[in-house]
Image: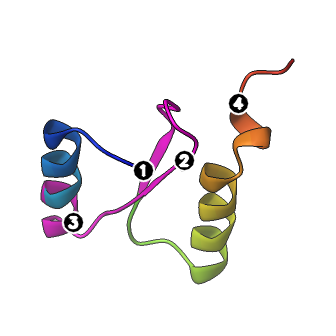
């Protein structure tokens, strides 16, 4: 997965503010979820949602 420089900088800035960013690994998919201060279970749920393109990608 190749991110643009502005996206990488935005993710780095979010990390400095204590936020974690999870992106969909599917090429061209714009889905990204940022979170902080949530439970481990909720972080796992959001990570699964973000990385499973079949759950948020186009329905064909």
Instruction: State the separation of the CA atoms marked 3 and 2.
Output: 17 Å
Whether 35 is among the magenta residues is no
Q: Earlier in the sequence, mark 3 or mark 4?
A: 3
Q: Nearer the viewer, mark 3 or mark 2?
A: 2
- Characterize the local packing of mark 1: few (<14), some (14-19) or many (20 or more) Cα atoms within 10 angstroms: few
Residue, disc 1: 1
> How far is disc 2 from disc 1 in space, using C-alphas?
9 Å
Residue indicated by mark 2:
24
Q: How many marks?
A: 4
Measuring from the top left, give residue 44's x and y in whole percent: 64, 72
Disc number placed over residue 15 in the picture, else none: 3
Quadrant housing residue 41: bottom right
Which residue is identified by label 4?
Answer: 57
Instruction: Assign a secondary structure to mark 3.
Output: helix
Sort mark 2 into few (<14), some (14-19) or many (20+) by Cα contacts within 10 Å: many
Q: Position of residue 8 (x, y in %)?
A: 20, 50
Viewport quadrant of the C terminus: top right
């Amino acid at each position: 997965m190749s991110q643009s420089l502005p996206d990488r900088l935005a993710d780095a800035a979010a990390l400095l503010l204590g936020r974690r960013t999870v992106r969909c690994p599917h090429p061209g998919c714009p889905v990204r979820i940022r979170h902080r201060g949530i439970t481990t279970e909720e972080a796992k749920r959001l990570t699964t949602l973000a990385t499973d393109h079949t759950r948020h990608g186009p329905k064909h």
